[in-house]
Image (tube, rainbow, N blue to C red):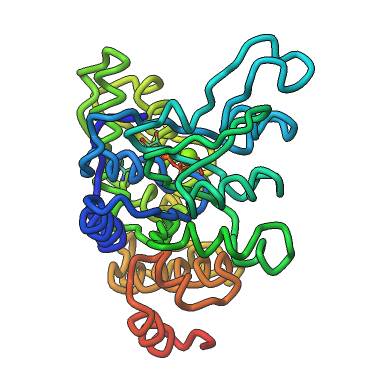
């Protein structure tokens, strides 16, 4: 995980603000958000802000443990508790004593493990497999999931009582496409980190237009995908700046689409096949700049509408303008609204 983090969007600041306020209390916190949105980053920040910061931080990926082992991994087991249990083993809960237990992908827990976790949260105690006496415990439980837990509850896959126990304080991290203002500071942050890690202190910035392309992307893999993209770009970069060529191919085609080369002859006839239509030239060899820009704008608007399947808000986001501005421009240009 990267050291330090960026919190320049309203959403991220709000999340950290809530976490800072509840950090001293030790209450259970549920963090939701798509994969790669930074759930683990904020959970670690919560631990650091809490009085338990000197205690252990134990992260458990509940989805990565085999179903039949979840209980013994979490709660530990006595010697001989099941076939193969040659020695007693303490679980993650015991390892997190006096600190934070981070249950990642909590939606993946088996029904049996859910019951035990509920008891842990209700009674602050648990019984290791094969033991008869319960053990008291003092850990702060923080859970995260990229699933819709309420939907899981409705579908009968997640216990409602456990959901309410976990959902005492809920922090949701929106996808990166809904907080695009964070793309630039994140890109700059990852550039510094990656350049340092790769021994490429010579890579110090982005070529013109690159940040705009990064900002316009939808980033289905969220912050993690942006981080990987920048890391790869730093390694590929031939100069001091990251250029479009260092980005994955989809960016190159977008850059080309956004800035098509002017046709060789400025008198190229107007076309309506979706490609840039240059207006008639004002004089021999001259281009009417205003009309050319106008044509380019229309073309970008049509592209954005096509890509967003006519969703004007999405199209406006892609173009980096307000929805109302887009609608005004469409009216002015006589584009179908
Ligand atoms: N605000 C941020 N500032 C700096 N780095 C960030 C930020 N958010 C996320 N990252 C980085 O992005 C990567 C993904 O973040 P993280 O692991 O916290 O996501 P996640 O929501 O837990 O993802 P998953 O659901 O896939 O486990 C990490 O390398 C993390 O350091
Ligand atoms: Mg995670």
Near-viewer residue (307 or 76): 76
Q: In the orientation shown, which residue stands out farthest toward the right?
A: 83
Quadrant location, ligand no. 1: top left
Image quadrant occupied by the N terminus: top left
Q: In the orientation shown, which residue stands out farthest toward the front?
A: 133
Residue 49 occupies which quadrant of the picture? top left
Percent x, y of residue 74: 57, 32
Percent x, y of residue 126: 54, 40
Residue depicted at x 63% and y 21%: 78
Is 103 displayed left or right of 150 in the figure? left
Q: Is residue 37 visible?
A: yes
Q: Is residue 83 above or below residue 177?
A: above
Percent x, y of residue 156: 73, 63
Near-viewer residue (282 or 88): 88
Residue depicted at x 53% and y 72%: 305
* Badge count: 0
Is 36 displayed left or right of 152 in the figure? left
């Amino acid at each position: 995980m990267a050291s330090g983090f960026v919190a320049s969007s309203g959403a991220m600041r709000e999340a950290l603000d809530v976490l800072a306020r509840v950090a001293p209390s030790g209450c259970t916190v549920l963090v939701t958000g798509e994969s790669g949105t930074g759930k683990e980053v904020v959970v670690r920040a919560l631990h650091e802000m809490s009085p338990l910061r000197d205690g252990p931080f134990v992260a458990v990926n509940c989805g990565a443990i085999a179903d039949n082992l979840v209980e013994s991994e979490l709660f530990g087991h006595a010697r001989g508790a099941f076939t193969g249990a040659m020695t007693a083993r303490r679980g993650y809960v015991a390892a997190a004593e006096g600190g934070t237990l981070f249950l990642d992908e909590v939606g993946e827990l088996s029904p049996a493990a859910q019951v035990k976790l509920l008891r842990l949260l209700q009674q602050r105690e648990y019984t290791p497999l094969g033991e008869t006496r319960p053990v008291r415990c003092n850990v702060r439980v923080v859970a995260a999931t990229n699933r819709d837990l309420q939907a899981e509850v409705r579908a009968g896959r997640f216990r409602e009582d456990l959901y309410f126990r976990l959902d005492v304080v809920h922090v949701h991290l929106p996808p990166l496409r809904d907080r695009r203002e964070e793309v630039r500071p994140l890109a700059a942050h990852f550039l510094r980190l990656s350049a340092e890690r790769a021994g490429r202190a010579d890579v110090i910035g982005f070529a013109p237009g690159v940040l705009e392309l990064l900002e316009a992307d939808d980033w289905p893999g969220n912050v993690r995908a942006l981080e990987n993209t920048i890391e790869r770009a730093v390694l590929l970069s031939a100069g001091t700046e990251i250029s479009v060529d260092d980005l994955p191919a989809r960016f190159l085609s977008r850059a080309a689409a956004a800035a098509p080369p002017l046709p060789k002859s400025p008198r190229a006839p107007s076309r309506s096949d979706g490609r840039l239509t240059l207006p008639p030239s004002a004089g021999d060899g001259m281009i009417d700049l205003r009309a050319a820009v106008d044509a380019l704008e229309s073309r970008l608007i049509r592209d954005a509408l096509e890509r967003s399947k006519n969703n004007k808000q999405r199209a406006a986001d892609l173009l980096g303008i307000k929805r109302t501005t887009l609608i005004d421009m469409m009216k002015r240009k006589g584009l179908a609204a």
